[in-house]
Amino acid sequence: MTTIVAFHAHPDDEALLTGGTLARAAADGHRVVLVTATIGMKGADAPRLAELEASAEVLGVARVVHLGYAGSRHGPILYPDPPGWVRFVRASTDEAASRLVGILREEKASVLLSYDRNGGYGHP
């Protein structure tokens, strides 16, 4: 059995971008772990988290992990960080990468699904 980690910026990206791949991998018996950098635009965005958990269940995801950043907001304005949160776009690259590497090591992941250097579609 292979462990596959899918790393996405936001809740819902897993369904929009890799849902078929994740569902197929889980159905084929692989352990699928879903990591999101953010948990919503303002931090603890309960509806987005509930939707993410529901999506993960349908896709057969074994574990969902959040790196704990607020969403970056797409558009011409980069709003200030919400109280107690750092927007992912402002996060230290080393810190965020370290968090992800920790999960990859803990899971002994064989495959990492992610984005190209432009975020897939140019999102900040």
Image (cartoon, helix red, strand yellow):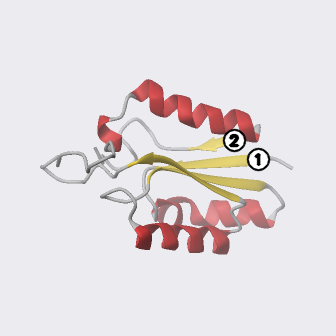
Pointer 1 residue = 3
User: Which is nearer the eye, 56 or 42?
Assistant: 42
Q: Residue at x 12, y 49 (%)?
A: 77
Quarter occupied by the C terminus: top left
Q: Looking at the image, which is closer to me, 115 or 102?
A: 102
Does the image show residue 62? yes
Mark in front: 1 vs 2: 1
Residue 114 shown left or right of residue 9 in the figure = right
Q: Is label 1 in a helix, a strand or a loop? A: strand
Q: Amino acid at mark 1?
A: Thr
Residue 83 on image: x %, y % = 27, 49
In this rendering, would 19 be left or right of 80?
right
What residue is shown at x 38% (from left), y 65% (from top)?
Answer: 45
**Does dot 2 land on a helix, a strand or a loop?**
strand
Task: Decide: few, some or many residues near mark 2? Use Cα within 10 Å; few <14, some 14-19, many ≥20.
Answer: few
Farthest left residue in view: 76
Three-letter amino acid code of the residue under disc 2 = Val
Q: From this view, report whether residue 30 is shown above or below residue 47.
A: above
Out of 24 and 93, give the one closest to the viewer. 93
Residue 36, horizontal then vertical, whole percent: 50, 51
Q: Residue at x 58, y 74 (%)?
A: 54
Where does label 2 land, which residue? 111
The answer to which quarter of the image holds residue 30 is bottom right
Indicate which disc, 1 or 2, sits on the residue closer to the N terminus: 1
Q: Is there a contact, CB below 8 Å, between mark 1 and mark 2?
A: yes
Residue 23, picture quadrant: bottom right
Please tell me the numbered disc located at residue 34.
none
